[in-house]
Structures are given as structure tokens and as C-alpha cells.
């Protein structure tokens, strides 16, 4: 079997004017750092997968939002709704083509120029000219050697009934391989969708156990863990541990336990049994006590100590207030 032609890129040019683009000012004023981080995340998806565009309709839209949320997991975590709103704002400010965005395509002249320049030496590049923004003149200014340019020029020529040659056979093989990749992508998306549905079904039980709501971004993180192979029983056990600890921020505490499980490879009930606390072992939460809550932040142990002190002070204030009230009644 022949080697599959590469579609996306391994890296892309991060030019010095990317984040100082005037079109980014309004999204940055409205959403702060999230506008910049989400913009870069979209470019990574765009160049990595299709090379010059992102399909953004129906289930594909949900998948893109999920991927961006997964990239932002941690310090920059935010809700799926916010991610969608930022993407809409980026398109409204013409960082992406508005016309194509209304057709559920995320792309831009900047992205297509980068893709064109990066694929000049390729012998094959699969481009949909219905969504291609560069003119023949613009492409020639970049390079006249690109196979994309040659395809662009020849696409309008009526080839008639030509005999099948080696190029035709190559393109036929590439077409079959492209369909195979699309099928694999569809199957992967189906698995991701199933994981999200399982996470949603699990969310109500988790919220009951930890006594607080789980936001959309945390639900996406749970879906990612399920997709990676973590069983619901493991997630439920982490939730029970959280409920028993009664931390001040249960969702954050639960996330720490799950991160510890993922790092230690605890994905199944059997893994959990093997790491069950014994006289010489500590639970996953305890193993994480010296890990920072976030880069540059306090450790879990420091965080819990601060929570305990806050509870002690609050109790002291309540007792002091009660004593003052009783004294006033005398």
C-alpha cells in the first residue's frame, strides 16, 4: 500500500505580527487573554488537520469547541459557551473569512498563504477551490512552482475524455486514501461524542456526591478521561473521596484526584483496587498534596491548610458575635 499523502502541517509560521493584528483588538478587549489563546488554538487545529481550514458545522462545530476546551484545560479553562462566543467574535472581526464562516468554514487569507508557502515542494496537495481565497496573482507572488497553482490554473481547462495515465491512477489512489482518512475521522468523532454523552449522564451523580455543580469545561475534561479509557467507577470513587473530605472547593479537589489517577495510570476498577490505601500507602489525593494547584500557585496541602484556617476564623467570628449578642441582652 502506498504512503498516504500528507494533508496538514507539522508546524506553522508564528509571525511577529500575529497577536498585534488590529483585528484582534476588539476580541481581546471583550474576552481578554482568552481571545488570543483560543485564536492560537484554532490555528493549531487548522494547520494540523486540513492544513488551511476547519469544518465548523453541526457535530464538527461541537468537536472543534471540545478540542479547544481540551487545549485550554487547566489555567485557561473556560466554558464551551464562552469558547463558541469567542470564535464567533474572531470571525466577526474578520480574523477569519466572514463569508466562509457563514458557510461553516473557518479559514483566512493569512492561513491559506501560510499553507501555500509550506506546501510548495509537495508533489500533491488536496485543495477545495470552492473555499480557496487566494487569487492566481497572489499565489504567483508567493511561488510559481506550487502544485496548488498548477491545479488552480488547469481546473478550468476542459480536459475532455483523456486516456487514463499514471497521474490519474495516482489521484484515484489518493482519493480512496482520503475517503479512508475521512472514515477514520468520522469514527473518532463518534467515539468522542459517545464519551461526551456518558460524561453528561454521569454529571448528575457526581454533583450529588460532591455537593456542587460541575461546569461545562469540567464535563468536557471528564469526557476526555472517559475517551482515554477511564471507567465511570473510577470517576465515581474519586467523587466519593471528595464528598468524604468536604473540601471548600469540591470541584477543584475532584479535578486534582482525577489528574492524579490519569498521571498514575489508574483507569479501571482493577487499577483502583491495586492502588487501594494500605498501611504503607496513601490515597491519590494525598499523593498530590505537594503539587501546586496551578503554575506558581499554592500546593494542595497549603490550600487545605488555608481553608482550615478560614473555617477556624469564621467559627471564631460566629462565636464572638454570639457572645456579644448575649452580653447586650444582660
Image: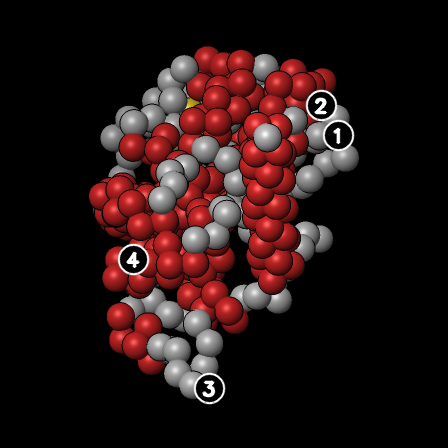
- Please determine whether, in this image, residue 266 is positioned above or below residue 21: below
Closer to the eye: label 3 or 1: 3
Density class for disc 1 (Cα within 10 Å; few <14, some 14-19, many ≥20) is few
- Using the image as rendered, state which of residue 220 and residue 65 is in the foreground: 220
Numbered disc 1: secondary structure? loop
Could you classify mark 3 by the number of other residues whose Cα lies within 10 Å: few (under 14), some (14-19), or many (20 or more)? few
Q: Does residue 52 appear left or right of residue 160 in this picture?
A: right
Q: What label sits on residue 17 in the rendered view? A: 1
Could you say where residue 237 lies in the image, as x and y percent from the top left?
31, 62
Per the model, the C-alpha gap separating discs 3 and 1 is: 55 Å
User: Depth check: 125 or 300 in front?
Assistant: 300
Tell me whether the residue at label 2 lies in contact with that at label 4, contact meaning CB atoms closer than 8 angstroms: no
Mark 3 and mark 2: Cα distance apart in space: 57 Å
- Estimate how packed mark 4 is, as few (under 14), some (14 to 19) or many (20 or more) residues with alpha carbons within 10 Å: some
Which tag, 3 or 2, sits closer to the chain's start? 2
Q: Position of residue 40 (x, y in %)?
A: 60, 36
Q: Which residue is mark 3?
A: 280
Q: Nearer the viewer, residue 31 or 126?
A: 31
Image point 40% across, 56% down: which residue?
A: 242
The residue carrying pointer 2 sits among few (fewer than 14), some (14 to 19) or many (20 or more) residues within 10 Å by Cα, namely: few
Q: Quadrant of the C terminus?
A: top right
Residue 25 percent across, percent down from the top left: 69, 19
| Count of all numbered marks drawn on residues in the image | 4
Type of colouring: secondary structure
Cα separation between marks 2 and 1: 6 Å
Label at residue 304:
none
Q: Does residue 264 appear to the left or right of 164 in the view shown?
A: right
Residue labelled with disc 4: 236
Report if the CB atoms under discs 4 and 3 are less than 8 Å apart. Answer: no
Q: Which residue is mark 2?
A: 21
Tell me which residue sits at (42%, 32%) in the image.
80
Amino acid at each position: 500500500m502506498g504512503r498516504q499523502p500528507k494533508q496538514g502541517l507539522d508546524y506553522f509560521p508564528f509571525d511577529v505580527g500575529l497577536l498585534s493584528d488590529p483585528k484582534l483588538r476588539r476580541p481581546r478587549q471583550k474576552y481578554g487573554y482568552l481571545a488570543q489563546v483560543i485564536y492560537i488554538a484554532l490555528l493549531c487545529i487548522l494547520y494540523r488537520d486540513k492544513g488551511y481550514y476547519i469544518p465548523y458545522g453541526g457535530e464538527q462545530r461541537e468537536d472543534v469547541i471540545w478540542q479547544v476546551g481540551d487545549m485550554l484545560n487547566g489555567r485557561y479553562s473556560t466554558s464551551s459557551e464562552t469558547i463558541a462566543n469567542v470564535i464567533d467574535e474572531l470571525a466577526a472581526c474578520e480574523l477569519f473569512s466572514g463569508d466562509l464562516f457563514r458557510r461553516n468554514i473557518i479559514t483566512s487569507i493569512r492561513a491559506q498563504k501560510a499553507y501555500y508557502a509550506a506546501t510548495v515542494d509537495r508533489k500533491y496537495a488536496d485543495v477545495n477551490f470552492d473555499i480557496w481565497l487566494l487569487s492566481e496573482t497572489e499565489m504567483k507572488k508567493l511561488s510559481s512552482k506550487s502544485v496548488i497553482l498548477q491545479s488552480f490554473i488547469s481546473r478550468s481547462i476542459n480536459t475532455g475524455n483523456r486516456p487514463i495515465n499514471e497521474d490519474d491512477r495516482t489521484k484515484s489512489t489518493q482519493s480512496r486514501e482520503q475517503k479512508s482518512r475521512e472514515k477514520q475521522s468520522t469514527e473518532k468523532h463518534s467515539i468522542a461524542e459517545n464519551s461526551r454523552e456518558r460524561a453528561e449522564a454521569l454529571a448528575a451523580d457526581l454533583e450529588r456526591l460532591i455537593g456542587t455543580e460541575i461546569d461545562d469545561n469540567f464535563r468536557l475534561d471528564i469526557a476526555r478521561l472517559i475517551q482515554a479509557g477511564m471507567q465511570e467507577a473510577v470517576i465515581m470513587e474519586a467523587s466519593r473521596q471528595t464528598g468524604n473530605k468536604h473540601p471548600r472547593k469540591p470541584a477543584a479537589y475532584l479535578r486534582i484526584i482525577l489528574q492524579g489517577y490519569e498521571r498514575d495510570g489508574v483507569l479501571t476498577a482493577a487499577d483502583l483496587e491495586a492502588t487501594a490505601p494500605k498501611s504503607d500507602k496513601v490515597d491519590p489525593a494525598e499523593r498530590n498534596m505537594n503539587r501546586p494547584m496551578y503554575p506558581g500557585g499554592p500546593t494542595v496541602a497549603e490550600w487545605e491548610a488555608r481553608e482550615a484556617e478560614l473555617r477556624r476564623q469564621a467559627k471564631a467570628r460566629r462565636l464572638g458575635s454570639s457572645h456579644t449578642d448575649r452580653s447586650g441582652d444582660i
